[in-house]
Amino acid sequence: MSKEIFESKKIEIDAIPDKDALTPNIPIDTALQEGENLNVWCQDDKEALLKAGLNWKLVEDLPLRIAALRYTESIWQKDFKSKEEAQIRWTAESPAAYDLRDELVHHFYHAFYEMPDLYARTQRIDEGNTHADMIQDLSDLAALGKANTTALKAKNIDLTLLDKAEKLSGAMAKLLAEANGKKMQDNKLLITRNKAYTFMKKAVDEIRRNGQYAFWKNPQRQKGYISQYYKKLNAGRKNNTPVEAQK
């Protein structure tokens, strides 16, 4: 349902200029809950809020803006966690890939020692030290080895390493892309999430502003138009009390 609501508000959300998309300075789950709380709280104050000048359509639209933000946050978190998991896997699995690459280079220098052309090709493959180089090296070594199996057999080199290198090259390329190669997509998802947050915040801020104005002499009603998160945060700063770190 949240996806359908997001799609219904997408034009309005996308219309927010990138430069105006706010980076949340409050945990998203807290912002969402405060939005839900505000939506319930203000229902009994319609007359007073209308008198203060609030456009009631903002109140009616608030649940949709909350749902749209909830959806974009879920998508962003899913993508972020996927990337994070890929980075953990890369850290765990890449040493073995580097070891295989180094082992094949070691074997090839030995097998092709008296073959200047093949030896020089091995040297060229051996150049470079980035992750991308290692992945390409595995592919190139597999191809070079399969084209010269006779020389490798003569030195009793395990030819199954060639298939292993070829498969590992493809697998590591995919893993590296998942870990590092989706920056543009990541950025797009983050900007959309931030725009959805900005879209909801505009409604929340306007409802709160009018509520604080309307109930300036009624603290029992006015308190529902004040962010409890920031109230606690500000109180903690005044008292030098540690506050839970923001997300």
Image: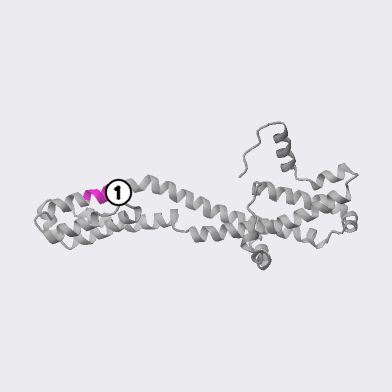
Q: Determine the secondary structure under disc 1.
A: helix
Stretch in magenta: 98-103
Q: Would residue 44 be found to the left or right of residue 238 on screen?
A: right
Q: Residue at position x 31%, y 56% from top? A: 133
Q: Residue at position x 84%, y 49% from top? A: 212
Please tell me which residue lies in front, 158 or 103: 103
Q: Residue at position x 56%, y 59% from top? A: 189
Q: Would residue 127 be found to the left or right of residue 171 on screen?
A: left
- The part of the image, by quadrant, that contains residue 57 is bottom right
Taking the view exactly as shown, the residue that stands out farthest to the bottom is 11
| Colouring style | one colour
Confirm whether residue 168 shows in the render. no
Query: Magenta stretch mostly in which secondary structure?
Result: helix
- Residue 100 painted magenta: yes
- Residue 9 painted magenta: no
Q: Which residue is mark 1?
A: 98
Mark 1 neighbour class, 10 Å CA radius: few under 14, some 14 to 19, many 20 or more: some
Residue 124 lies, in percent from the top left, at 22, 58
Instruction: Give the number of marks.
Output: 1
Point out the image quarter for the C terminus. Answer: top right
Q: Residue at position x 68%, y 66% from top? A: 12
Residue 82 lies, in percent from the top left, at 49, 52
Residue 161 lies, in percent from the top left, at 23, 53
- The part of the image, by quadrant, that contains residue 140 is bottom left
Residue 192 lies, in percent from the top left, at 60, 60
Amino acid under disc 1: Tyr
